[in-house]
Image (spheres, rainbow, N blue to C red):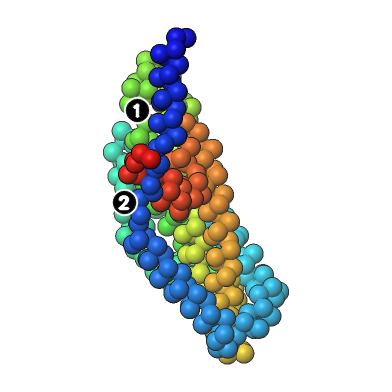
Amino acid sequence: MTETQHSANTRIVDDADAIRVIPLRRPGRWVSGGVIAAMIAVFAYSIATNPRFGWGIVGEFFTSEAILIGLARTLELTVIAMLAGIVLGVLVAVMRQSGNPLLSTASGVYVGVFRGTPLLVQLLFWFNFAALYPQISVGIPFGPSFQIGSVNDLITPFAAAILGLGLNEGAYMSEIVRAGILSVDEGEVEAAYALGLRKSTVMRRIVLPQALRVIVPPTGNELITTLKNTSLVSVISLPELLYSTQLIYSKNFEVIPLLIVASLWYLIVTTLLTVGQHYLERRLGSGQPKNTRTFWRRLLRGIAGSRARSIGDVQHR
């Protein structure tokens, strides 16, 4: 290296050392953050010091036997209804894509009916289904039939809750699955048909596995929604989490503390489900950039953005 090149390199290093990056000042961000922090502090102090919240009663009943039994029933309803909804959703979505007009029309009517009526109405309908058909019988159409039993004995409050939640969830899941199916490139499907694969094999081996990236995020949201919708079955006197709290505060008249107990349990379960959904999405989205998959990393970068992403006015010493 010549003396001239060495001198030039030294000058570049000295100039780089002389550069000082000034962070872009964002006073509005700090002011708004301070206001929000003050509001949170005032709200938290009010909650902690207001005796009407009854935190002692909340602690007393938070892990009581009745509440835990109601929580277990809520989780049971959520799992069964969600599994039924997923199975129905896949079946109905495939029917909607069928070339058979009878299948596609029937699936469209199913989705329209169960998405177009409130879930609360559906639960009440199934709970009172015996008013329409008191007895269930099986036989030859327009011919002899064999009576099985009373509808009141078959459709218990638990069965009515499963029917209402499961059928309603199936209608929503069918649209989610259908959107995932439509997101798969048609060229891949045509290539599979060109190889001589059957339609059922193409759907099972090629379409549905690729559609999972589109299906999983809204399915996680539907799971959380189903968990919260189980509170509606309290109208048919099924002792899930909310109805269990109602039974307790109908005796001790501590309405607000018992509602806080139920709300805290809902928050705990939904938080756990959200964390699980986040990591499942990360696993399925392994081909995406990391900064688009990691929520906490984006959050930390946003908090530290005033320094990390400063565009800076460059000055020389």
Vertical order, 166 against 20 (above or below): below
Give the residue at mark 1: 185
Residue at (40% x, 19% y) in the render: 8
Q: Name the image quarter holding the C terminus.
A: top left
Inter-mark Cα distance, 2 to 1: 27 Å
> In the depicted view, which residue is nearer to us: 52 or 218?
52
Residue at (34% x, 41% y) in the render: 315
Furthest residue in direction top, as rendered: 2
Coordinates of residue 114 in the picture (x, y in percent): 37, 57
> In the depicted view, which residue is nearer to us: 186 or 109?
186
Q: In this view, does 166 lie to the left or right of 253?
A: left
Q: Are marks 2 and 1 in contact (CB under 8 Å)?
A: no
Local crowd size for mark 1, using a 10 Å CA cut-off: few (<14), some (14–19), many (≥20): few
Give the residue at mark 2: 109
Tell me the amino acid under the disc marked 1: Asp
Furthest residue in direction front, as rendered: 3
**SS at mark 2 in the image:** helix
Q: Is residue 172 left or right of residue 234?
A: left
Total labels drawn: 2
In the rendering, which numbered label is found on residue 115? none
Q: Is residue 114 left or right of residue 221?
A: left
Mark 2 or mark 1: which comes first in sequence? Answer: 2
Residue at (69% x, 80% y) in the render: 60
